[in-house]
Image (cartoon, helix red, strand yellow):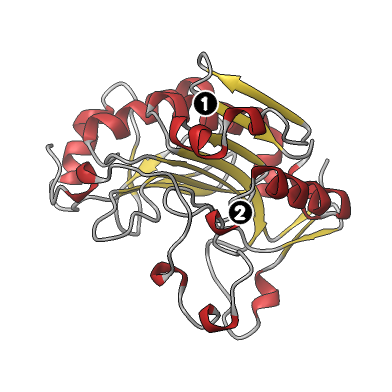
Amino acid sequence: MASVKNAVLKVVVQTTRSLAHVEDVATFGRIMSGSAPNLAPRKYGSTQPLKGELNYLAIEEQLKHVYSGNGEDVLFGCGNPVAGYMNFDAAKGVRAWSNGFHGTWDFSSAVNYLHEAHAVLREGALAYNAAYAGMSVGGGNFASVNIQDPRQNFGVVNGIVVPPVSISGIQALHGICWVNIFGEKYIEFFERSLLAKVPCYKSEFLDNGRYFLFQVTEHPEEMFAEHGVKLTNQIREVLGHPRAFQDYPRPVAEKRIPPWLLEFEAPSFDFSELRIPSHPV
């Protein structure tokens, strides 16, 4: 049993099209209820308190009620056995940093259901033709964030300190996550032959080569141990494109520029659907 303090498990599936449509959100709910019942949300709603028990047999009708007054984004609450939340974002504006599915669960109990989290990542990526999908463990309590003392936001898993985790991957990769799935554009961007050489615990091409999955270490907290950090650095060297990552070594002149104003190396994605101002209900 893992020793855990102040840590969460985060799964992100990012697409270049809107996932705010009722049909898409309902489909993901059904995926989770079948493949990851212990991580699946129990309640729905866009504001606290979350209300309404989720019925996967009538989820589309329930979501229509939620959508009737709550715009593009939908939030779900997870109860026993794993506390947490899920949300679907429809990006707007010039950048598309966070569009797609985001799930965050308390790692102290989610560690018992990592096989289900893997299923959410894989099935979600394939179901929605994801540009990028990632999963990692990080510090941070989703109920509160300590701004005065950022170290309070770090977590500990089996004695290994883990920093807060933030996963993104459309217009700039946040970093190398514990488990990563690249869609076709990223496979082309990094080159298939180089991806096959990535040094990691496990890697494979999925869906007849349309996706590439690689898991850096056996256990998620090992990412922050010495051998995990070394592997991560080796992977980035193999992949090349240092400016594809948000934390690339910046020249002094760029250090004070916020990341959303910087230019990164990334595949050329079509974001036209994300700019649609409203979704059909």
The image position of residue 215, as x and y in percent, is 70, 35
- Mark drawn on residue 211: 1
Depth order, front residue of 228/196: 196
Quadrant of res 219 = top right
Q: Residues within 10 Å of mark 2 (few under 14, many from 20)?
A: many
Q: Which quarter of the figure is the C terminus placed in?
A: top left
Q: Please name the residue that numbered disc 2 is placed on.
A: 175
Q: Could you tell me the amino acid type at mark 2? A: Gly
Q: Residue at x 48, y 48 (%)?
A: 169
The reply, left or right, for residue 31 in relation to residue 250 is left
The reply, left or right, for residue 194 in relation to residue 56 is right
Quadrant of res 157 = bottom right
Q: Residue at x 60, y 86 (%)?
A: 148
- Mark drawn on residue 145: none
Depth order, front residue of 231/196: 196
Q: Secondary structure at mark 2?
A: loop
Q: Residue at x 52, y 78 (%)?
A: 254
Q: Could you tell me the amino acid type at mark 1? A: Tyr
Q: Secondary structure at mark 1?
A: strand
The reply, left or right, for residue 83 in relation to residue 223 is left
Residue 263 against residue 8 in the figure, above or below: below
Q: Residues within 10 Å of mark 1 (few under 14, many from 20)?
A: many
Q: Residue at x 56, y 72 (%)?
A: 145
The image position of residue 227, as x and y in percent, is 87, 49
**Residue sitting farthest toward the bottom:** 148
